[in-house]
Amino acid sequence: MDTLEERVITAWVKLTGVLKNTRITQGMIYNEAIVMNLVYAKYREDGVGLTSFKEIVQRTQMLKSLVNRTIESLVKKGYLERIDGKDKRTTYVKAANLDDFLEEHDKTLALVRGIIETIGAEDAETFVRLADKITASDPLNNSSES
């Protein structure tokens, strides 16, 4: 019988594979969807959505170079616009075309509704609680790297 640690790793790998293979968004690659979701969450929070590159790097755990490429792609596609900060070392992005993103986001929400129907609302709430607990604990001690 596998240990609990082995079962957690296996479950994690399976879940990651399912999420990436379902193509959460059809019109964006995975990293673009992750960045847009962050910017959209910020927009829902404050009505503006101004998000710094540094915050995106910290919250996604992506390499700076990958964040730059991802943002450049989203700017070219018209989803984001770059905004220079007061000093040249800080750059921000904000949503440029929320309507197109929300069209993609609605497809993602439909996928999530299907997952919730499959596992039930109670297990979905438990999943969210556990995922939040894992990310808040920063088990890999990534918070100091950026």
Image (cartoon, rainbow, N blue to C red):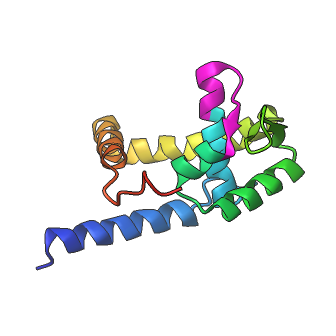
Q: Residue at x 48, y 57 (%)?
A: 145
In the rendered image, residue 56, in percent from the top left (x then y), is placed at 61, 47
Q: Residue at x 83, y 35 (%)?
A: 96
Q: State which quarter of the image contains the C terminus.
A: bottom right
In the rendered image, residue 126, in percent from the top left (x then y), is placed at 28, 40
Whether 29 is drawn above or below 37: the answer is below
Question: Which of 118 and 14 lies nearest the eye of the viewer?
Answer: 14
Decide if residue 107 is in sight here. no
- Left or right relative to 34: residue 50: right
Farthest-out residue, top? 47
Decide if residue 110 is in sight here. yes
Report the number of numbered marks. 0
Farthest-out residue, left? 1
Where does the magenta region start and end?
41-53
In the rendered image, residue 28, in percent from the top left (x then y), is placed at 73, 55
Taking the magenta stretch, the answer to whether it contains residue 18 is: no
Q: Residue at x 71, y 44 (%)?
A: 104
Taking the magenta stretch, the answer to whether it contains residue 47 is: yes
Farthest-out residue, front? 87
Q: Which image quadrant for residue 139?
A: bottom left
In the rendered image, residue 77, in percent from the top left (x then y), is placed at 86, 50
Q: Which image quadrant for residue 67?
A: bottom right
Q: State which quarter of the image contains the N terminus.
A: bottom left
Question: Which of 102 and 33 lies nearest the eye of the viewer?
Answer: 33
- Left or right relative to 146: residue 30: right
Whether 121 is drawn above or below 53: the answer is above
Farthest-out residue, bottom? 1
Q: Residue at x 58, y 60 (%)?
A: 62
